[in-house]
Every structure is written in C-alpha cells, then in structure tokens.
C-alpha cells in the first residue's frame, strides 16, 4: 500500500505520483543507455547565485540556471549511481509502506559498495536533488529527518493519518502540558478547525512554556508553536498549512539578536537549502513581533554586548534583500548603535507575567492584531 | 774517528755502486712486446680470468665485424663457450668474413702489434693489432694450449687449419701445424682457444653481445654460452658502408709523424702539404708556408729539425676546414639505433639523434645518442648507460668515462627525471662516439678520456633528447590520468545499468557502447528492423580513422544505401566490404535489406580501439 494523502494546493502530491516521477528518472537513464548514450541528469544549480526572489509567491526559489551531470565524469557517474540506488531504495520502501530516517538511509547505503555515501550531508543533498527533480517533498519518499518537529499548543483541531488509524486531536484539550508534537511528515495532517485569533511561533522552549503556564493561549485565543531554534522543515511546513487553512495572523517571537532575525526570515521567506520547496515551507505573511532592538531600549531589558560576529551578521542583514525595508533597517541600525542584544526571557526581569500581560498585548495591538 | 768512518763508508759505497751497475748491466736486455704484455696483462684487458674471456670474445668479434664491414658482407657470427671436463673453457668464434690468406694467419694471430689499421685514419673497431694475439698469448699462458685457426678466403681457395702459439721472447709466431683441410664455409675465419678461466662474468658477456647487436643492427650473432643458446638477430639487411681512410688533418698531427712524412717527401713543400694532408688546398698551403716562414718551393725532405717544428706549429695555428667526417666516419643512424634498442628492451619510448661531425685536435668525431624509457627496463635504480666507441660496447670503468661524467653533469630534473648523480628510473641512455681516433683512457679501451669538445657534443645531444623525453613523459602522464578516469567511469556505468534495470524491472542494457564512447573507441552497431539491416559506425577516438567495415551475409546484397568497395562471393556466403575514411567524432551508416543473421566486423584498426555490437542478439 502506498501512502494516500490527498492532493493539496501548493504542491502537495500523492505518494504514487511521487514514485512515478522518481521512476521516470530511472526510465530516462535506461533509455539513454539503451541508445548507447551516456546517462545524464539536469539539476538547477544550487548556489546562492541561483537564488531569486519570486515576487508572486514572495519566497526565495532557485533561478533558471541548470547544470547537467553526465556519467562521462567520474564524480557525476558516482552521483548518478547513488541516485539510481536511492530511487531503487525509495521504490522498495514505499511499496512496502515503510519509512526511514535520513540517517538510516545513510547507513543503508553502506551495503551499496561503490555507491555508498561518504558523509550524511551527501545523502541529504541527494534527497534534496530528488525533491527538486520530482517537485515532491521527501515525506512522499517516506524519508524523514531524525529530530521531530516541535510542538503546538492552542485552540486548533487537527486530523492526523497515523499508521494506526486516523486520529483527531485538539491541541488544548487532547494534549498534555507540552502540547501536540508535530510529526516529521506533516503531509498526513489536516487542520479541521480552530478557534484562534492569531498564532505565535516562539523560538525558545522557556518562553513557550511560560506562555502556556500563564494561560496566554486561552486568554487571547492564541495558537502557540514552539520553533525549537531554527525550525525544522516540518515545523515550517505546518506553519504554512495553518496559514493557508486557518488564515489567521502569524507572529514570530524570537530573541533580540541577528541570528534570531534569520529564524524569522527562514520562516517568512524560505532558506537556501530548501529553496526548491520554498512555496511549501515559507509563510510570507508571518510577521516579526520581537524582541525588537527598540524593546531593549524601551523596556530597558537586561542585555549583553554584541560580539564581533553579531555585528558582522547584523551588517550582512542590512544588505540582505529579505531585510530590505524601512522597519528592519531602522531596527538593525538602532541595535548597532545600542551595541546590545537581549533574550526572550529577559522580560522576566520585570516579573514572570510581564511578557504575557504587558509586552505581548501591547505589541499585538501595535500590529493591529488585537 | 768519525771522519775516518765516513771515508771508509764512502769508499765502500763506491764499490757497492760499481758492483750494482755491473750486475745490472748484465741483467739489462731488450724486452719483447710479447714478454712485456705477458707481465702486464691488465693493460690489454686480461687482468683477471673472468675478464679474459670477455676481452677475448670482444677482440675476436671486433675483428670479425671489421673484416665483414670492409668486405661489405652482412656479418653472421658464432660465439661458443664450452666448459671442458678439466674446468677450462674452450672458446670458439667463427665469422663469415672475407677470411685471411694463409701467409698472414700466423702473423695476425701469432705476433703482437701486427695489424692493418694502425696506419689508417678512419673509423674502425680494432686499431693496433694487439687484441687477438694477446688472447692467443693468454691462452698459451693459462692453459698451455695453442690456438686453432681455420680460415678460407673464397670458393676457389682451400681452407687452412693452423695451430699457433707465440714465442714470447721474440714476439714471433710459433706455427705448430699448418694443414689444408675441407671446410664447409666458403669464406670466413674460425678461431678456437682454451683458457683456464671462469664464467663468473657470463651476464656481462651476454650484455656485451646484446649491446654489440644493438649498435651493429646488420649483424646476426648466435651464441652458445655454457649450454645457453642465444640469438641476436639482425634488424637491418644493409651492410654498413665501410668508412674510407683519409689523410691526416694538419691539426691532428704530431711531430714524430710529421718528421717521418717529411723525410720521405722529395717534392716542394706546398705540394707536400696538399698531397699529404686532408683539407689543405693551395690557399691553406700558402698560408702555412708563410706563417712558418718557409718557401713553398723548398724540397720538403731538406727541411731541418727547427724548420719542421715551426712547420708543425704553423699547421696547427692556421685555420683549416675540418676533416671530411662523412667519408671516414660511419654513424649507425637514428632509425637503426632506435630499432636496436626497441628490439632488446621493448621500450615505451625511444628517440635517437646523430649530431653533425665535429673535430677534436684534428680528429673528426661524431656523437650519436638515444634515450629509451619504460618497457623491460627496471623501474628502480640508476638509468642504464650504454657506452659505445666505434660500434664497440664499453663494459668496464663506467665511472671513469667521459660519457658517464657528462651524463651525471646534466640536470635531468629539468626533464622530469629524478637524479642522484646519474639519472634514475626506467631509463636507458645510449651514447656512441665514432672517431678516427677514439681517445681512450687506456689501451684496454674501457673508458673515453675527458675531452671538452667531446663532452660538449655529448651534452648537447642528450639535452636535445631530454627535451623530447620530457614531452613524452608529460603527455604520457596526462594520458594515464585520462585513462584512469575513463576506467573508473567504465566501472560505474554497468552498475548504473544494473540498478536502473532492477528499479524499473527491465533487462540490464548493454553498456559496451557507452564505455567505448568514454574510452574513446570506434563503435560499430548493427541493428535489424523491418527487414532492414543498419550498420552504424561512430568514431569516438580523437583521430580520423581509415578502416574497412565487413558484413557477412547469405545471398545477395540488396539495396545498399552505400555501394560496397568490393564483394566476395563464396558458395553464396557473401563478404561485403566498405572502405571508409571516418574523421574523428564522425558517424557513418549504411542500410540494406537483410535479416538478423547478418554479422559485421571492423578491420584495419587496432583491436583495443574498436567495439562491435550486434543489437539483434
């Protein structure tokens, strides 16, 4: 039995289709070889130079540039051999309705002799290549990352197709204190109802737990999502899904330093590594709530001095097209002037309730959300 | 007291000296050359029993080759060395040369310093006439047996057999037997001698024969050495043109020789100079006379000693054209050196150069050299150096030879050859010096003396060859890397085919054509569809190729799109041939009516460069 997710808008595709697309690659090689031609494959070039902002979807995608790998070069021949093995492996795995992690795939390749991967990064990259070639997410290949997605807490009802049957879960009523854990394959999940006014995605577990403890979700009809630092694909994908199905404002709440702004950017605009599926993973409507450099000043938050790397990162963000607007330029320049950064938990200096009672309501009303 | 003692001592001393002188006078007498060499065997290369055999073979072979060359005969030499029950060795050398007339045989073999070439100025192997008679002497000393000689000068003469020794006291031949016999050879010479010796240097002896064969590609040498049979066959069927004698060159003459020439000349000085020396014309003769302050008309034999001295220095200082090397020197030539080396070492690369002739001290000389690489040569260790003088291999005293020191002085690293003194690696360096007067360091003729003119020529020719070698090496390395890459790919492609076929559940496709493409080969494919046979040939090599495409079929060739070059019909089995010129990267194709029973092949191309695929199987 193959996985049987219904077609989704925004590129979600049924698994059988994914396998057919994969097999088309093998079939093309087969006919090339039958005609005495050297097997080859064309891929968009996966460098920063080939990243382009797609105005229509407001996400970053790979541009037009392609390169062809032909087995006439030793490296390319090996690449094609590995790809051929991976396709064969995925076909088997999907046919048997099994799944494996990216790490497992790396170890499975040990048995492929010449085709085995020398580093896990190689196998991850190759899977991404296949995603690009088939315009399909790896979840349809039954491949998942090791780390699970983060968690959700709030007035949201989901239906999940699990291996053991369909489950309907309410993310406040049916879950424990930690919330609903986002599985690695989000394609099996559907949002079937919600009672929320907005969603806040939070960088740190401490702040996520604080808001749950302070009953913020109930008091403000908010869905809380724990990003767990730089969010995993599944986390970004579910944010994208919630945005598309629930159509509620989405806010990103992170630390007040340049690295956290990048977390926001990857949620909102997409990441280089996954630019081929930016439209599935990015949520361009997401807005930054804080901690803003101006908050450090206005609330006189406990802070640290910027390191040289911080300053470098801030300066590079000034030239990054994703931050190319007045708001970010003002904030970043202010931060460089203050020469300070603060964490989310710094609000605790003004009391444990301050963030839920004062700061967030104030920011949300500033932003016109409540 | 002291004084007295001294006086007495003095007197006694005088007495002692007179007695000594008398005694000495009684002992003093002239020594024959033979006696001298009996005591100084090492000067002729007979310093040890091991070397004795090699020197003997060498002298005999040199003589045979020289004789054949003079008679313009393709040499056929036999060298035999047999172990006797007594432990001694019997040495036999036989040639097909012009033979030696019976009157001369005892003198040639039984008298030291008897020879034909000593007074001639031209390139030859032997010179003084010592070698072979020294061998006779050596046999006589070590085993006490006379040397047996058989020689015949042609079909109209009889063969004679001699048994000869040398009277050491008088340096005269001692003929123990002279007999007319029947001999199957029409012309030629055979010598047999017995030595007390060892065959410890067997390897070197074989080496000597091998090297001799390399620089004498016109000779066939057959050898039986202690039951081991060897044949060094000829690679050239042209007898070498025997170099001609030339007159001495004014720059190369010494006082004694000049004095002798002068004393015999009853002609005016100017004509003497023009007729007795090479490259002296009227102008040069006049120049010499005026710079020696002598009248060109003076009768030469009347010159007195101081005049002869100033004549000599005038001859040496006047600019005179170098001697005509083309006449008196006989280089082996680049193609034959290459063939000779290739034959013995199956080299991957070999190049040879012959330098234009040059002159040292009035003696014309010429350097030839070759560098070979790879093949059967050892990967490790010093390069192998083959030294030759007038087509004779030099086997001993390599380190003392100007050829070796010049090789070591060249910076081989700049030709991508590692070096520790001598160059290292699977390298062979051959240097041949041809001259009317090869300057050996000693009479055993083992090493070339260090003469700057000669060393310069050796350096120039080796540098020239080094540059070519470097080009070969870098090209080869590039090709090697290309090949390694292609092979790596060709190992991967079948695996791709296997796993892809497994994935889409189809039979594994044949990847030979792809490999051919990657390995840059010529690929011919035959495919039959709807009763039409199509033959396609793709040239994936980097060169245009001339080849013949063969198709084998039953019955007539029907409707070919390209008419074949010829058809052979044999009981209804047709062989159809197309002659094709296919530029690189080009494709050629022919179709005709037929069935899948047609088979094809490509001919006229290296087997390793072609792939023939029958797509109907």
Image (spheres, coloured by chain):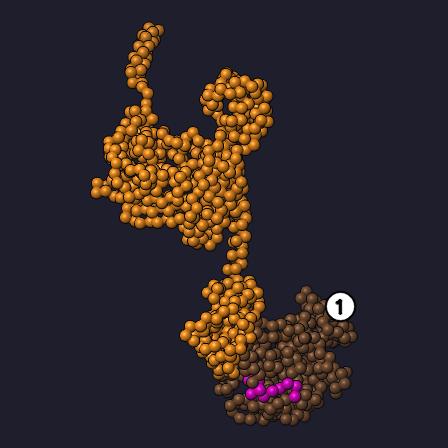
Chain colours: A brown, B orange
Taking the image as shown, residue B362 lies to the left or right of residue B173, namely right
Which quadrant does the C terminus of chain A fall into? bottom right
In the image, farthest residue toward the left: B85
Give the chain of mark 1: A
Q: Position of residue A325 (x, y in %)?
A: 76, 75
Residue located at (71% from left, 68% from top): A316
- Observer-nearest residue: B80 or A332? B80
Where in the figure is residue B454, as x and y percent of width and height?
50, 36
In the image: residue A320, left or right of residue B336: right
Task: Look at the image and give the residue range highlighted in magenta.
Answer: A9-19
Asked whether residue B440 is in view, the answer is yes
Which residue corresponds to the image point at 74% horizontal and 68% vertical from the top-left?
A336
Give the residue at x 36% y 45%.
B76
Rendered view: B128 above or below A251: above
What's the residue at 43%, 53% (across, down)? Answer: B346
Q: Is residue A312 magenta?
A: no
**Residue A101 sits above or below residue B89 on the image:** below
Residue B384 appears in the rendering: no
Which residue is more in the foreground, B388 or A7?
B388
Residue under pointer 1: A337
Give the image quarter of residue B18.
top left
Q: Position of residue B427 (x, y in %)?
A: 46, 49
């Amino acid at each position: 039995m193959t996985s049987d997710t219904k077609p989704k808008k925004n590129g979600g595709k049924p698994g059988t289709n994914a396998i057919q697309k994969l097999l088309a690659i093998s079939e093309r090689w087969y006919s090339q070889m039958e005609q005495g031609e050297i097997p080859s494959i064309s891929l968009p070039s996966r460098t920063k130079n080939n990243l382009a902002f797609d105005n229509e979807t407001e996400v970053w995608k790979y541009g037009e540039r392609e390169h062809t790998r032909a087995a006439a070069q030793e490296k390319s021949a090996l690449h094609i051999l590995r790809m051929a093995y991976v396709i064969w492996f995925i076909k088997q795995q999907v046919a048997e309705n099994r799944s494996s992690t990216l790490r497992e795939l790396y170890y499975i390749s040990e048995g492929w002799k010449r085709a085995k991967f020398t580093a896990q990064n190689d196998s991850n990259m190759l899977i991404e290549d296949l995603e690009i070639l088939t315009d399909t997410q790896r979840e349809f290949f039954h491949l998942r990352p090791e780390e699970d997605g983060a968690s959700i807490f709030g007035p949201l009802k989901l239906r999940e197709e699990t291996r053991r049957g369909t489950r309907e879960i309410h993310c406040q009523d049916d879950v424990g204190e930690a919330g609903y854990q986002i599985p690695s394959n989000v394609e099996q999940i559907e949002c079937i109802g919600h009672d929320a006014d907005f969603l806040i995605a939070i960088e740190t577990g401490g702040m996520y737990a604080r808001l749950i403890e302070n009953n913020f979700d109930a008091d403000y009809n908010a869905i809380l999502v724990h990003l767990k630092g730089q969010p995993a694909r599944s986390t970004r994908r579910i944010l994208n899904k919630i945005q598309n199905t629930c159509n509620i404002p989405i806010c990103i709440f992170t630390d007040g330093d340049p690295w956290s702004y990048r977390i926001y950017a990857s949620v909102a605009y997409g990441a280089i590594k996954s630019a081929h599926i930016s439209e599935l993973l990015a949520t361009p409507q997401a807005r930054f709530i804080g901690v803003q450099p101006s908050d450090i000043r206005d609330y006189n938050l406990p802070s640290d001095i910027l390191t040289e790397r911080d300053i470098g990162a801030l300066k590079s963000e000034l030239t990054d097209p994703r931050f190319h607007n007045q708001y970010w330029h003002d904030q970043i320049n202010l931060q460089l002037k203050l020469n300070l950064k603060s964490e989310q938990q710094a609000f605790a200096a003004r009391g444990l309730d301050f963030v839920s009672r004062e700061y967030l309501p104030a920011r949300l009303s500033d932003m016109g959300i409540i | 007291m002291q004084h007295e003692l001294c006086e007495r001592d003095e007197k006694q001393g005088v007495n002692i000296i007179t007695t000594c002188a008398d005694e000495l006078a009684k002992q003093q007498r002239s020594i024959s050359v033979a006696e001298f060499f009996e005591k100084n065997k090492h000067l002729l290369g007979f310093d040890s029993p091991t070397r004795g055999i090699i020197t003997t073979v060498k002298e005999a072979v040199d003589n045979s080759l020289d004789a054949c060359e003079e008679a313009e005969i393709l040499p056929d030499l036999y060298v035999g060395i047999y172990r006797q029950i007594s432990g001694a060795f019997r040495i036999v050398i036989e040639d097909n040369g012009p033979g030696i007339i019976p009157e001369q045989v005892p003198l040639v073999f039984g008298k030291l310093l008897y020879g034909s070439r000593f007074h001639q100025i031209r390139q030859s192997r032997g010179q003084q006439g010592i070698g072979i008679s020294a061998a006779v002497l050596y046999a006589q000393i070590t085993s006490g047996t006379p040397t047996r000689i058989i020689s015949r000068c042609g079909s109209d003469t009889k063969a004679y057999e001699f048994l000869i020794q040398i009277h050491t006291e008088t340096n005269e031949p001692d003929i123990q037997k002279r007999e007319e016999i029947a001999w199957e050879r029409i012309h030629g010479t055979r010598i047999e001698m017995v030595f007390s010796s060892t065959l410890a240097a067997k390897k070197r002896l074989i080496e000597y024969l091998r090297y001799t064969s390399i620089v004498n590609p016109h000779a066939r040498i057959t050898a039986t050495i202690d039951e081991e049979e060897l044949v060094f066959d000829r690679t050239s069927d042209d007898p070498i043109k025997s170099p001609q004698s030339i007159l001495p060159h004014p720059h190369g003459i010494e006082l004694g020789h000049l004095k002798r020439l002068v004393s015999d000349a009853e002609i005016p000085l100017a004509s003497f100079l023009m007729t007795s020396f090479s490259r002296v014309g009227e102008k040069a003769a006049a120049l010499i006379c005026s710079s020696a302050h002598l009248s060109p008309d003076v009768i030469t034999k009347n010159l007195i000693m101081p005049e002869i001295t100033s004549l000599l220095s005038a001859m040496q200082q006047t600019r005179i054209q170098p001697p005509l090397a083309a006449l008196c020197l006989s280089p082996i030539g680049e193609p034959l050196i290459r063939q000779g080396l290739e034959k013995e070492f199956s080299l991957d690369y070999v190049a040879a150069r012959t330098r234009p002739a040059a002159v040292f001290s009035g003696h014309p000389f010429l350097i030839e050299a070759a560098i070979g690489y790879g093949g059967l040569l050892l990967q490790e260790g010093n390069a192998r150096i083959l030294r030759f003088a007038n087509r004779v291999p030099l086997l001993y005293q390599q380190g003392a030879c100007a050829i070796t020191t010049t090789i070591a002085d060249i910076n081989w690293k700049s030709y991508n050859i590692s070096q520790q003194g001598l160059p290292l690696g699977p390298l062979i360096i051959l240097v041949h010096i041809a001259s009317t007067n090869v300057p050996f360091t000693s009479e055993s003729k083992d090493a070339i003396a260090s003469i700057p003119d000669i060393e310069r020529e050796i350096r120039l020719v080796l540098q020239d060859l080094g540059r070519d070698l470097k080009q070969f090496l870098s090209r080869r390395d590039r090709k090697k890397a290309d090949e390694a890459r292609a092979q790596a790919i060709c190992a991967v492609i079948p695996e791709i085919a296997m796993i892809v076929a497994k994935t889409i559940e189809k039979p594994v496709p044949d990847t030979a054509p792809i490999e051919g493409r990657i390995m840059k080969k010529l690929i011919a494919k035959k495919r039959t569809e709807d009763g039409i046979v199509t033959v396609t040939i793709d040239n994936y090599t980097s060169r245009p190729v001339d080849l013949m495409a063969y198709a084998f079929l039953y019955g007539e060739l029907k409707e070919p799109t390209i008419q074949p070059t010829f058809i052979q019909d044999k009981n209804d089995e047709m062989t159809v041939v197309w002659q094709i010129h296919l530029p690189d990267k080009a494709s050629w194709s022919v179709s005709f009516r037929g069935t899948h029973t047609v088979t094809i092949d490509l001919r006229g191309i290296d087997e390793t460069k072609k792939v023939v695929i029958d797509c109907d199987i």
